[in-house]
Amino acid sequence: MGFNCGIVGLPNVGKSTIFNALTANQVDAANYPFCTIEPNTGVVAVLDVRLDTLAKLAKSKQIIPTTIEFVDIAGLVKGASKGEGLGNQFLGHIRAVDAIVHVVRCFDDGNVTHVHETVSPRRDAEIIEMELIFADLEQVDKRIDKVGRMAKIGDKEAQLEFGALEIAKKALESGKPLRLVPEFDAQACSLQMLTTKPMLYLANVAEEDAMLEPNSTKNAYLVDLAAYAAEQKCSVVVISGKVESEIAQLGQDEKKVFLEDLGLHESGLFRLAKEGYKLLDLITFFTAGEKETRAWTCAAGSRAPQAAGKIHTDFEKGFIRAEITSYEDYVGCGGEHGAKEKGKTRVEGKDYIVRDGDVVFFRFNV
C-alpha cells in the first residue's frame, strides 16, 4: 500500500464525484447533504512511467504498480465536533487515515446546492479546519486534568505529556492547527490529534478551468483558496470532478487524446499522487525480474531492512544485504546484467538508506 488518504469537505463540494472518478468505484453521489454516511474505500494504482521501462528491460511477465487507498468520508458540517451531522462518527473515520485531502468547491453551478448557499473557499476551508481544532481541543481538555495529577506526583512520562498538552491547548485555543506548531511534541502525547495530520487542498473546478494552475488568477475562487492554503502551509491540487469522471470511463489511448484536447499532460489522479507523496515524504523503489516488475512505497529515510519489510516481514527479520542499482544506471546499462558487468550494482547493508528509484534485490534468511 502506498498511503491512506481521507477525502473530506463540506457536503456537495464534489467529494464523492471525485472519489468515483479516482477509484472507478461508483458510490452514490446525490445532490444532498450526508449522501455518504459510511466511508467508502477505494484502492487505486499510482502510474509511474519508470515501471514500463524497467519491465521491458527485465522482460517481466507482469507489471504491478504501487497503490493509494482513498477513503471518502461523509461531508462535515459546522458543529461536527459537537456531534452535528453525525460529526463524531465522521471525525473518528478521519483519525484512521495518514493524511487529509480537503476538497473545496471552486465553481458556480445553480443546479448543485451549497450547504451555505454561496461559494466561498476560504470560509468553507475554515469551517472544516475549526471543527478539527475543536475536536482536538475537546480531547486535550479531557486528558490534561488526568495527566496533570500524575505529573504532580513525579511521573516523568506524565510530566512530558503534560507539557505537550499545555502547548497544544494554547495553540488550539488560538485557532492554530498543531501541524503549524513546531514546538508541539506529538510523540510525548498519547492522543491522536486530527490537526497534526498532513493536509492538502483539492480545488474542485469547472471543466473549463481544469488546466489552471493553483496560483491562477483566472478563477477568483482559486485565488481565495490559494491564499488560505499558503497561510496553512498546505499545497493545492486543481481537479475538475466532471473531467475526471469522463476520463475514468475511457481506455488508455482515449484518455491520452482527451487530456491533450484539454491541454492537460496528466490526469488529476497523477497530480494528486505526486502531491500526496510529497505530503507524506514518501519514495518509490522497485524490484524487477522475469516474473514481475513491481513498485513499492516507503518513507523517505527508510533503511534497507525497513524497505524490505514492505515486501514481506520475513525480508526485514532475516535481512542479510541488498543489491542496489539506481534506476538511471539500470536503464543506462540495459538492465540487471549490464549494470553488474559495469560495476553499477552495489551491495549495501543494514544502514543503507533507500533512495527513490532504486532497483533492489534483497538477500535474506529466515
Image: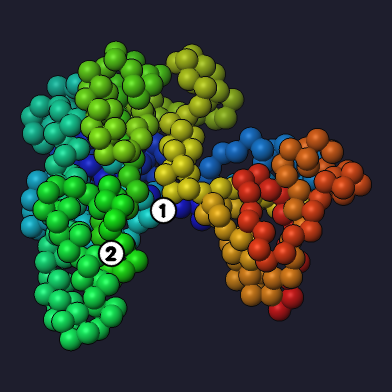
Rendered location of residue 216, percent (x, y): 33, 17
**Residue 272 versus residue 179 in the image, above or below:** above
Q: At 37% from the left edge and 32% from the top edge, which residue is drawn?
A: 237
* Residue at the spot of label 2: 192
Mark 2: amino acid: Gln
**Residue 148 versus residue 77 in the image, above or below:** below
Rendered location of residue 327, percent (x, y): 72, 42
Q: Is residue 196 left or right of residue 120?
A: right
Give residue 240's quadrant in the image.
top left
Label 1 crowd (10 A; few <14 / some 14-19 / many >=20): many
Q: How is the image coloured?
A: rainbow
Q: At 76% from the left edge and 48% from the top edge, which residue is drawn?
A: 325
* Residue at the spot of label 1: 4
Residue 231 visible: yes
Q: Which mark is residue 219?
A: none
Observer-nearest of 348 and 77: 348
Label 2 residue SS: loop
Q: At 62% from the left edge and 46% from the top edge, which residue is drawn?
A: 356
Q: At 11% from the left edge and 36% from the top edge, which residue is drawn?
A: 115
Residue furthest to the bottom in view is 153
Observer-nearest of 285 and 40: 285
Rendered location of residue 67, percent (x, y): 52, 49
Q: Is residue 346 left or right of residue 299?
A: right
Quadrant in the picture for the C terminus:
bottom right
